[in-house]
Amino acid sequence: MTVITRFPPSPTGFMHIGNARTALFNYLYARAKGGKFVIRIEDTDRARHSEEAVEVIFNALEWMGLDYDNTPQSQYENRARHAEIAHALLAAGKAYKCYCSPEELEKMREQSKSEGRAVAYNNYWRDRDESEAPKGVQPVIRIKSPLEGESIVDDVVQGKVRVDNKQLDDFIILRSDGVPTYMLAVVVDDHDMDVTHVIRGDDHLNNTFRQNVIYDAMGWKKPIYAHCPLIHGADGSKFSKRHGSVSIEDYKNMGFLPEALNNYLLRLGWGHKDEEIIPMERALEIFDIKGISKAASKFDFKKLESLNAHYLNAADNDRLVDLISPFLKEKHNIIISEEGLTRLQAGMDGIKERAKTLIDLAAESRIYLVDAPFPYDEGAQKHLTPAAKTILKEILTELKALNDFNHEDIEHKCRNIAQIKADGKLGNVMMPFRAALAGTDKSPALFEAAEIIGKPEVIKRLEHAIAYIGTSASH
Ligand code: GLU
């Protein structure tokens, strides 16, 4: 059997982190088993439909690197086929027309409530002759659900889940205006797309029992189901906006790498021994739906961050330069010059070790990309004091005299200055030096950075900082 999994998102305008994990599981399972991964856009809600919302999904899939094997299908475009199946069920006596008015349905609902029954509709038209149909009323089509016994879903994750068939109503499969219901559309599409495995959130488990009624009525083979527990926030409730960002795009904009997010989402609710770092290549070797945990998992931002730090450190430097470019432009108004690029490439190893996100990386890169004169932020200003001016002048003199501008010699000079001018406190030398070079109070390893920036530019930055203290000391 060729495994065929599917991802059928509803275009809501963003890709929820939980949906992304569902997509990932389906993708991995198909790929790990040499099967196919297919996409269907569940776009039947026409009132809220927009092409942009569909784009968001494809952008997210592309960013995550989840490629698929079909021309993505539109559920809405397939509505004639869904209606055809509703009529086939009708013709086979597995479904029937129901002419109840909204008022009648409301009465039934009230009565069933007062009798403590689980379903609202009382099957009024189930065995009634159509000759009794009221004139001029367009009927809906309802499916005949089993009346007795119990239904069982043998779920890969949840185990055997049972439902008393009294809980299953004769639900609508085709509305009076001929529009198929979601329940019908999903089953017909999954069947027509030859889906073998349905891996989705356990919020769909209730639907599964109803969907199985349609499978049975059509005599179709049911897929294997794996209902995954939802992702929760730290407080144990369903992960939502109040816990933090819920959309994939937000994580991209916060400077996370797709491989870090994939690894994080994979581990969130799935495990293989105690492996934590699981790049996609490895996941493709070991992923199986059997490893999906039955317990809900909590979203842990710190863990995601530490995985991101790991993948940033492992990433190719040229790729990182490309990835931080938009952040540099947007957050720091910096466009990388040719000279800046050469410095950044030399300095990248040193900064990527410490960064947690691409935003950190962009901020730390600035030291290689700016040319003096540049402004000093508050953190830098704190260290550009009149006392620091003497130190900076000293550094300037010493560094000017260096012929070979390497980090060991630069460090040696700074240590000497600390001994002579700062009671041996290296920090009192480094902090103003850092402020002068970086324009802020954080930087990669300073002496290495100075070497990479190069003598002429270091001299220029020191001179500029000294001149700045001259002007700023007056106020
Ligand atoms: N369109 C549904 C959703 O986005 C998915 C339904 C399913 O997986 O069967 O939740």
Image (tube, grey):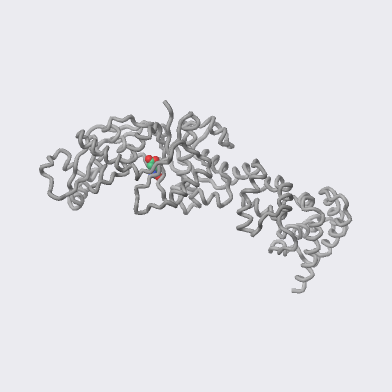
412 relative to 310, above or below:
below
x, y (%) of residue 361?
A: 65, 50
Does the image show residue 397? yes
Left or right of residue 46, residue 146 in this image? left
Name the residue at 48% across, 36% down. 27
Name the residue at 85% across, 56% down. 399
Which image quarter holds the N terminus?
Answer: top left
* Quarter residue 294 falls in: top left
Left or right of residue 473, residue 253 in this image? left
Does the image show residue 228? no
x, y (%) of residue 74?
A: 38, 43
x, y (%) of residue 277?
A: 59, 37
Foreground residue, 74 or 195? 74
Name the residue at 72% across, 55% down. 367
* Quarter residue 93 falls in: top left
Which image quarter holds the C terminus?
Answer: bottom right
Name the residue at 48% across, 48% down. 233
